[in-house]
Image (cartoon, rainbow, N blue to C red):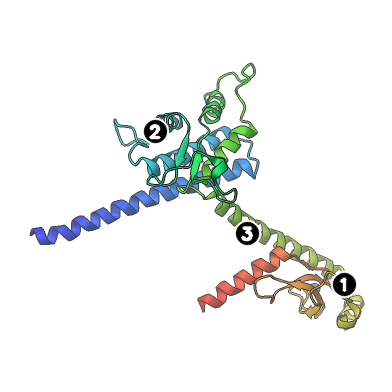
């Protein structure tokens, strides 16, 4: 094979290596976010120590690999350093302050008072002492030592806060995405439950009562209040009656109503309306 033929191949390998590094970093950030979210928002308790260690190791590895490439790994082999060793790397590289500039070429302003208070800090502070303390707490439990007489054997709010603070680093910034995904899933489940409840209520109504409710003129019955944008009477997604009294609409396109069906009692909240509008916009974009 000639040199001319080999060179492009070398370039492609370099590209693959870069992509591999990025995908490893993405996986680390995702693992950090999933575990941190579970601890901070879902209040995970069972196995919290293992979840904490996984979050911390992945978060620190992503930050170290981003800031000092290669130092996230042990010199003896390809293994990623332990959380404790990664804290050593940060401590040694930051003169024990734990403060990591996001841009190595831009000096970090030490004088916070001279900064615009609305400017977010261009650095992440790793609370080395608190995170070391958290490792002591998790190791005691994970290694099945007797925890009854050991006051250090508990994860605290401060430990979780120190973990959350890592998310400010550009290599992470991923907890918010997990939060949004979980909210999205939770809203979907909540609307499914509301639809089932309204359907059961509707099925329990007497036929004559259903007929009476369907025959009413909701444009005159539903009186506007000071809080309403403008009342619209729409079709109900559960019972199909033209009795869904929308007192507001989604904030994206004002196409999905927020309110109640006066026949079957189905309620569509503002969050569900936003969700349905986003789904609809995605559907339109895919066509
Ligand atoms: Zn209905």
Separation of disc 1 and disc 2 at Cα?
62 Å
Q: Which quadrant of the figure has residue 269?
A: bottom right
272 sits to left or right of 90: right
- Which one is earlier in the sequence, the residue at label 3 or at label 2? 2
Marks 1,3: beta carbons within 8 A:
no
- Give the residue at mark 1: 225
Residue shown at 87%/72% (left/top)?
225
Quadrant the N terminus occupies: bottom left
Residue in front for this viewpoint, 118 or 144: 118
User: Which is nearer the N-term, disc 1 or disc 2?
Assistant: 2
Q: Residues within 10 Å of mark 2 (few under 14, many from 20)?
A: some
User: Residue 93 — which label?
Assistant: 2
Give the residue number, with chain letter if any, for mark 3: 184
Disc 1: CA contacts within 10 A as few (<14), some (14-19) or many (>=20): few
Q: Is residue 182 above or below residue 137?
A: below
Instruction: Using the numbered discs, state the Cα–Cα distance from disc 3 to disc 2 in whole angstroms.
Output: 40 Å
């Amino acid at each position: 094979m000639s040199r001319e033929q080999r060179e492009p191949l070398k370039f492609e390998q370099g590209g693959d290596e870069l992509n591999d590094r990025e995908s490893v970093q993405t996986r680390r950030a995702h693992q950090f976010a999933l575990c941190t979210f579970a601890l901070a928002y879902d209040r995970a308790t069972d196995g919290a120590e293992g979840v904490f260690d996984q979050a911390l190791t992945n978060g620190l590895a992503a930050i170290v690999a981003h800031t000092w490439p290669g130092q996230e790994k042990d010199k003896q082999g390809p293994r990623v350093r332990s959380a404790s060793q990664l804290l050593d790397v940060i401590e040694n590289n930051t003169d024990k302050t734990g403060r990591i500039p996001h841009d190595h070429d831009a000096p970090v302003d030490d004088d916070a008072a001279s900064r615009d208070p609305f400017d977010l800090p261009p650095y992440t502070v790793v609370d080395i002492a608190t995170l070391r303390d958290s490792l002591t707490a998790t190791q005691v439990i994970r290694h099945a030592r007797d925890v009854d007489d050991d006051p250090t054997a508990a994860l605290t709010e401060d430990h979780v806060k120190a973990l959350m603070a890592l998310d400010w680093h550009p290599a992470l910034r991923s907890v918010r995405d997990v939060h949004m995904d979980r909210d999205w899933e939770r809203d979907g489940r909540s609307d499914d439950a509301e639809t089932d409840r309204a359907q059961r209520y509707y099925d329990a109504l007497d036929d004559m009562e259903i007929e009476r409710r369907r025959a009413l003129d909701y444009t005159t019955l539903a009186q506007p209040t000071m809080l309403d944008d403008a009342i619209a009477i729409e079709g109900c997604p559960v019972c199909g009656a033209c009795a869904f009294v929308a007192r507001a609409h989604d904030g994206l396109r004002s196409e999905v109503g927020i309110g109640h069906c006066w026949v079957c009692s189905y309620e569509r909240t503002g969050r569900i309306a936003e969700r349905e509008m986003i789904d609809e916009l995605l559907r339109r974009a895919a066509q």
